[in-house]
Amino acid sequence: MADGEDPHADTRRLSAVTLDARSIGRSTRDVEHERAVAIYDLIEENSFTPIGDTEPGPYRLSIALADGRLLLEITREDGAPVVRHHLSLSPLRRVVKDYFMVCESYYSAIRTASPSQIEAIDMGRRGLHNEGSEVLRARLKDKISLDFGTARRLFTLVCALHWKG
């Protein structure tokens, strides 16, 4: 182990992430691709620990929308429940809406715009993605300890649940 590495990193992480099939709306190939990449990247590299959990992970996370709320169900690898969080989506609504509008512009631009136009739209898209990630991270601060990269990938998945096609 190198200096500065967390000796418990293998237990402070997600080993699996699933999205509730009933929560997922119709989506485009681009959205399906982003969702698959976000799940893959999230599993490969994340920092995730439910606040107050006294037993080591790793954890499994199920994400759903239920009654207009975000449902995060955390279990151990063997399926034993750890905690379930219900979060209001109100703080995320504006940034998710803006993010979708910019993403649609970005996907259209990829097919027809100049490289400088694509880059400008992508900068706006990344900025909104970062903003949404910070909002999500702030909403989870007393519930789940996670790093910014993990929050970014989770925001992508939250957006995937909102996408109506």
Image (tube, grey):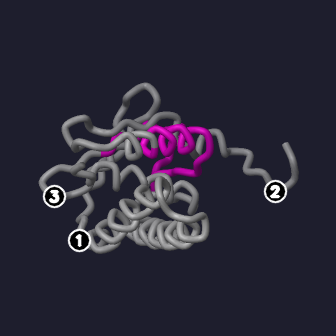
Q: Of all residues shown, which one is farthest toward the top?
A: 78
Q: Position of residue 107 (x, y in %)?
A: 43, 56
Amino acid carrying label 2: it is Gly
Picture coordinates of residue 93, whole percent (x, y): 26, 69
The magenta stretch spans residue 37: yes
SS at circle 2: loop
Magenta highlight range = 34-63
Q: Which residue is mark 2?
A: 4
Question: Contact (CB < 8 A) between labels 1 and 3?
Answer: no
Whole-Å distance between the Cαs marked 1 and 3? 9 Å
Q: Which residue is mark 3?
A: 68
Q: Amino acid at mark 3?
A: Gly
**In the image, residue 96 lies at what x, y percent?**
32, 66
Pick whichever of labels 3 and 2 is earlier in the sequence: 2
Q: CA distance from mark 3 to mark 2?
A: 41 Å
Among the 4 quarters of the image, the one containing residue 99: bottom left
Residue 26 vs residue 20, the one in the foreground = 26
Q: Looking at the image, is mark 1 or mark 3 earlier in the sequence? A: 3
In the image, farthest residue toward the left: 67
- Residue 18 placement (x, y as % from top left): 37, 36
- Left or right for 27, reference 5: left
Near mark 1 (Cα within 10 A), the count class, few <14, some 14-19 or many ≥20, is few
Disc number placed over residue 90 in the picture, else none: 1
Q: Quadrant of the N terminus?
A: top right
Residue 24 as seen in the image, left or right of residue 11: left
Amino acid type, residue under disc 1 in the picture? Ser
- Label 1: state its secondary structure: helix
